[in-house]
Amino acid sequence: MKAFYIFLASLLVFTTTGFTNNISVSTATLSGQNTSAHTEIINFNVAWDNSWRTSTNENNYDGAWIFVKFRKQGTTDWRHCTISGTGFTAATGATFSVPADGKGAFIYRSANGIGNVSYTGNQLVWNYGADGILDNETVEIRVFALEMVYIPSGSFYLGSGGTESFAFSNGSGSAPYLVADASAINTGTTTGTLNYGGNGTGSPIPATFPTGFNAFWIMKYEATQQQYADFLNHIDQARATVLNTSPASVTGSHPGFTPVAGEKSVSQVGFRFNGALADWSGLRPLSEMEFEKACRGYNTPAVANEYVWGTTTIVPLVTVTNAGLANETVATPVNANANIQSGISVFTRAGLFARTTGSTRELSGGTYYGVMNMGDNVEEITIYTGSTFGRAISATVHGDGYLENDGYTDIAAWRDHRAFGMRGGSYISPLANARTSDRVAAAFFSSYPSDNVGAGHGARLVRTAP
């Protein structure tokens, strides 16, 4: 029997809008039910600005992580759709990559190019039988999209050889350490071992840890207040109450939370929120080694004391125009490239420094691979390498879309405060924190078992590439 489905004609949830890359999902429908295979086709369009793919220099591309939530008619419980690894169809000019766990799909350019993209007529196959849905049940779906950047596999350096606090180094000296392959990493103070620089002990770092050598996808921007509100609105009220730690970011009540300023980065969140958001969206936390890889780049010589944009020049923001709006832009100084120790003393729109013309990596504050705000605005919560609890986290474990009854992730390794710290700077940080190899806060949450939700703490997530 053909089921009757409720579907949304236009979905703009869990997206980034305005001057970032203006990602949007639209015309999401269900069709082509196969009652023998218990599958259904999810149709949708997706578009965003300033997309790229290159096979030279950075040799990488951007894309979007697509995941889908559903709820049965008459219920308030949003569940995660299992996506089939076969039978999908990407729009002309695009391609899909579906991970083995089926928690979503990456869509990205199929050939080199740069500019805005609009992919219409995409089709993913939902294995609704695997999710416990009967052939004649009525459901509602929501399609979510997150802008991501692909970080290719390859060797890279940890540490810069400079004077950063607790920086990684090769043995007892200050020279950078080369992560040359995907094998386990021995630590210590002899040449050829990774030295924690006083921030952490223990050996080795297991091959299962996200060391950064293997390819991964990372959120292009810090999570925004709009994304934060969308997340809270698509979990139940009890869990949303636990995770609503940022009154400066959302207003209202469940399930009608709205962002205070949708384009601004969310703040006042801790490691537990990051773990819950990662679990809910099928992603995982970022490691501090992946942080350095995403900033410095593949096989790129380290520059002593470099900031995340690859130079030693930093120009703090003083003022903005259209504060808090979707078109918030840099006012003074005109060449500002970081919201850190700034005159406005508040977090800004995600991707603020990505100018529409005449931009450079230094001017945009972007990393080698085009990831924005890694050294400023709000700090990145990262897996702490210098702890046995952090090293217990595996690069192959991602969220399954569901949370524990207490509101937090059900992945045990992500629930221990000793596994997490922070990298990068925030609007209230010292300038030195924006340096790629600064580890002054790498072990931060070890001292805050109750999950410190400081004003400068944000969210950015990753997924190991399929």
Image (cartoon, grey):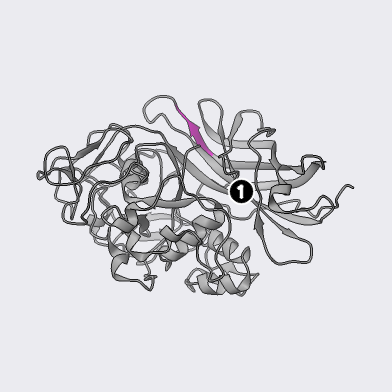
- Residue position for label 1: 67
What is the x, y in percent for residue 237? Answer: 62, 73
Quick one: 87 or 344, which is closer to the camera? 87
Specify the principal SS of the magenta part: strand
Q: Is residue 148 visible?
A: yes
Q: Is residue 433 above or below residue 354?
A: below
Q: Is residue 406 above or below residue 379?
A: below
Quick one: 22 or 103, which is closer to the camera? 103
- Is residue 442 magenta-colored? no
What is the x, y in percent for residue 454? Answer: 37, 70
Q: Residue at x 82, y 50 (%)?
A: 135
Q: Is residue 254 left or right of residue 18?
A: right
Q: Label 1 neighbourhood size at 10 Å, few (<14), some (14-19), many (20+)? A: many
Quarter assignment of residue 357: top left
What is the x, y in percent for residue 33? Answer: 81, 42
Q: Residue at x 25, y 46 (%)?
A: 204
Q: Is residue 281 left or right of residue 222?
A: right
Q: Is residue 327 visible?
A: no
Q: Secondary structure at mark 1?
A: strand
Q: Residue at x 48, y 63 (%)?
A: 324
Q: Mark 1 belongs to which amino acid?
A: Phe
Tell me which segment is drawn in magenta.
50-54
What is the x, y in percent for residue 402? Answer: 58, 59
Q: Is residue 39 above or below residue 458?
A: above
